[in-house]
Amino acid sequence: MLRALTLAAALVVASAAPAFAAGDAEHPHDHPFSFDSPVGTYDMGAVQRGFQVYQQVCSTCHAMDHLAYRHLGERNGPFALYMVRNHETGELEPHVGRPEHGGTFVDVTENQYVRAIAAGVTISDVDPNSGQLADRPGRISDHFRRPFPNEIAARASNGGAYPVDLSVITSARHGGADYITALLTGYTGETRGTLYENPYFPGHYIAMPPPLTEGAVAYADGTPTTVEQYAEDVTTFLQWAADPHMEERKRTGIVVLAFLLILAGLLYISYKHVWRDESH
């Protein structure tokens, strides 16, 4: 009996060791994201730029299996298309992103921007005529292209490390968006063999090389192309990918809270009216 208890205790300690070792990572700093507050919203310009960073940098290693190209053009998406009337000419003009006033939503199947994004990706699929794998342009119904066909190929291309899926990474990691931003900007430049020092990663050494370098991605809107800006933008995109209905949920929550406050007031008034002639 004593031997069994000793063995069980040893197993518990052994299984807890990685958790204690992981606790030495630095706590990420609080970053002022636009979506942080209870009434916060997504900066869709940042989401669009973040998708650009993911597409040109992160997608070479990391998949996003839970996201399809059509999601980019849905009502909550960064490339949702609206037809907005020009007050000067009176004509309807396309507008990417939710306009401040008015606008008619264009169904994602008619969204030429999302269709162009999908068509710019090569997808390996089974040819219906030959039954063999063949490359074709992407469709809006396709999920984001995987950089590797399987885990073995992914590990072989990354020195044995397996690049995690980024679909819900901000929800899956303690610290959320703050952690992702801190990790992307936290490289010290020191290395240990094939590992790179990063104080925000458990153990302080990570197999992923610094993914972001200044000027690596060109922004058409004139936004600074710094590592810090890239990190903020791609984190905003990843947060949107993990929780695309956040804004709608927050609006619903505010309406529900307002309803409950009004209901509480009416119940209190009813209580005072019903029991006005009773002594307490």
Image (tube, grey):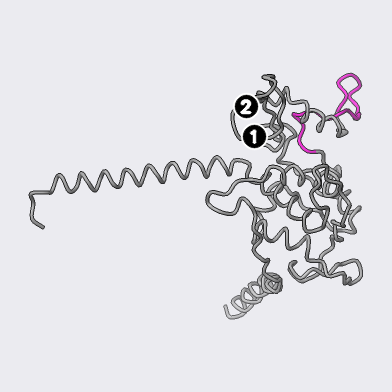
Which residue corresponds to the image point at 74% horizontal and 49% vertical from the top-left?
A: 166
Name the residue tied to disc 1: 98
At x 70%, y 41%, the residue is: 66
In this rendering, the answer to whether 173 lies above or below 62 is below
The residue where tag 2 is placed is 103
Residue 226 part of the magenta-drawn span: no
Point out residue 4 in the picture as x, y percentages from the top left corner: 61, 75
Magenta stretch, residue numbers? 126-144
Q: Quadrant of residue 147?
A: top right
**Front-lying residue, 253 or 33:** 33
Residue with the most extreme front position: 88
Which secondary structure class fits the magenta region best? Answer: loop
- Residue sitting nearer the eye, 41 or 190: 41
Residue 2: numbered disc: none
Say whether residue 147 is left or right of residue 245: right
Q: CA distance from mark 1 to mark 2?
A: 8 Å
Image marks 1 and 2: residues in contact by CB distance under 8 Å = yes
Judged left or right of residue 132, residue 177 is left
The image position of residue 279, as x and y in percent, is 8, 55
Q: Describe residue 191's horizontal placement relative to residue 23 as left or right.
A: right
Q: Residue at x 67, y 66 (%)?
A: 29
